[in-house]
Amino acid sequence: MHRLRSTLARARTELEVAQADGESAPADRLLDDLGEALNLLGQVESVAFAIVSVLVVDDDERLAELTARSLRRLGYEAESASRLRALKPGEVVVFDLSLASSLNAEERSALVAARPIVVTGAADPASRAMAEDLGATDYLIKPVESAELAAAINRHGASGPR
């Protein structure tokens, strides 16, 4: 909360100084400050309201967005992507196993640390072993029902950090 208050106060001060000097506000710096403030506010809300943040990563962008949309309807803060991005603290990752080979070492390490929920169309032992290597907390076979995915997300949160 302190960082959020500090960021917003800094933005307000910059606006007040610019206004007093008759200048327009330094837009880039203000946008950065407001972006940081909104990010911090999201973190506070997540903790205060127990909102779970979910990143759905799938090679099929349409399927990823449909999955994220169904999770949002269930009350999750869900976002879709076709590639793994930097993860927010505590964010749950729903990861399409077909993308595992495209991960670089840093991405792979971040994914393992996040203990993803793996979704895949493959049920073979090699795929299960690959999911285990990624530290998967769940292994779900596509097509995955929203209720089944929500249950996996809830189990993920209950399992706590390794």
Image: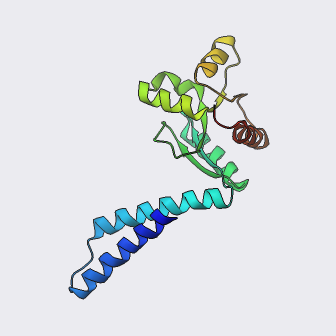
Between residues 66 and 24, which one lies in front from this camera angle?
24
Q: Residue at x 64, y 35 (%)?
A: 161
Asked which colour scheme the image uses, the reply is: rainbow
Residue 122 visible in image:
yes
Residue 104 visible in image:
no
Looking at the image, the residue that sits furthest to the front is 2
Looking at the image, the residue that sits furthest to the top is 125
Would you identify the image quadrant in which residue 119 lies?
top right
Left or right of residue 108: residue 44: right
Q: Percent from the top left, x then y, of residue 55?
A: 57, 43
Between residues 58 and 104, which one lies in front from this camera angle?
104
The vertical placement of 47 against 2, above or below, is: above
Q: Percent from the top left, x then y, of residue 95?
A: 59, 33
| Quadrant location of the C terminus in the rendered image | top right
The vertical placement of 37 against 136, above or below, is: below
Would you identify the image quadrant in which residue 91 lies?
top right
Q: Residue at x 61, y 25 (%)?
A: 135
Left or right of residue 149: residue 69: left
Left or right of residue 132: residue 104: left
Q: Percent from the top left, x then y, of residue 87?
A: 50, 42
Would you identify the image quadrant in which residue 128 lies?
top right
The vertical placement of 72 against 120, above or below, is: below
Q: Residue at x 33, y 69 (%)?
A: 30
Q: Percent from the top left, x then y, of residue 121?
A: 67, 24
How many numbered marks are there?
0
Between residues 18 and 94, which one lies in front from this camera angle?
18
